[in-house]
Image: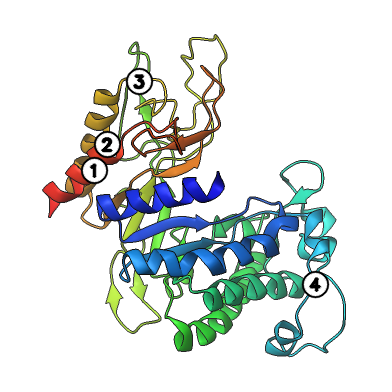
Amino acid sequence: MAEAISATILRMLGTIGAKYIGRSICLWGGEANLLQNFARAKQQLPMVHATDPGMILEACIFEIVTTEVEQIPVPPWAFAALGLPVEKRNFQYEAILYPKAQRTRSWGSGAGIPDVSQIETQLWFYFLAVSYIDLGFEGIHWGQMEIMITTILTLRIMLTSLRWFAHMLRNTRAVAWYSAMPMFPAAAWCATVSYYSTFHAFPLRIKEVPDHSQQAILEVGFADSIFLRSKGGLTSSGWQCEHLPYLVELDNWGASKKSRTGRTRRQTGSGVTTRLPGLRTRAKQYRSEWLEYAWNWVRKTDSNGYLEMPGSRTMLSPLDHRQWYYANVPSSAVPEGLGDEEAIRAIWKSDR
């Protein structure tokens, strides 16, 4: 069944003309499945590039690590690259985290936020990035850099963490240069990190329309949205800009304050599929119109921004409790497909 779904999604990507495939491989924790994912990717990447050699696939390194990381052995080449003595052991969960006094937030029991100033974190990130590059991924999404840099915003600690992040990214780019020159999107707009990022990535931060259930708009300045705020500077490729380009995506966290179930969630403008275009709860026509609205609004509001279309991703739907969204036309392989691929193709074709 998994093979049939992959084939259907691959067909959709070719049909709509997708070129940059965001989050094409990612794990939110669950490191015990990492090596299995590597093996599956090794089989599937040639299929993708056979469909369209111009497709760029993005891998993800997120702002989370769990105790399962201790099931992954550290390869000798990772030790060598960071100038560390080679030893036979697995990654160490506690050594990747912030010191206990600085752990102001976590992802629950057995899951925490990596502290990039720790040598073990640099070892872990380097292993992930180089493994993805060797598999053929040409883009790497680095998650929320700002919370991996520091959870205590003092200037001294922040600058120290930024220096370590820059060092780690510089080492990774040295490998990337001879591999495929990957692009590094960062879910932050810190100018210091811009030098190592090709573009930024951030949630849309969608605003609900008062007194209109499941309707929503985009607005400059709402919540912590990135519109008109992308920082620039000198990039590692040698070109300079005032504002790096960026992608904005439909996030998968949260639910509308006006859920029909009576369940409420704190409004953060996270841009959930169930909230505005209700990518699950609203009619197909409304979803199509909203995607077109969002694409055009972003392009007209900020020439540096682009809407990253939803394809296949986790979601939260308080109405029917579904946990995955497919843009595919419904089929035997993907019966829950919502048929939004036609709208996406039309929007991109019109924009050209």
Q: Is residue 43 left or right of residue 75?
A: left
Q: Is residue 246 left or right of residue 275?
A: left
Do the residues bearing badges 1 and 2 touch, measured as CB atoms within 8 Å? yes
Do the residues bearing badges 2 and 3 touch, measured as CB atoms within 8 Å? no
- The numbered mark at residue 295 is 1
Q: Residue at x 71, y 75 (%)?
A: 123
Q: Mark 2 sits on what residue?
A: 291
Query: Could you tell me which quadrant the C terminus lies in?
Result: bottom left
Q: Mark 4 sits on what residue?
A: 73
Residue count near mark 3 (Cα–Cα under 10 Å), binned few <14, some 14–19, many ≥20: some
Q: Mark 3 sits on what residue?
A: 282
| Cα distance in 3D space between marks 1 and 4 | 43 Å
Q: Amino acid at mark 4?
A: Pro
**SS at circle 3:** loop
Q: Residue at x 43, y 51 (%)?
A: 7
Q: Amino acid at mark 1?
A: Trp
What is the total number of numbered labels drawn onto the structure image? 4
Q: Is residue 158 visible?
A: yes
Q: Is residue 67 left or right of residue 250?
A: right
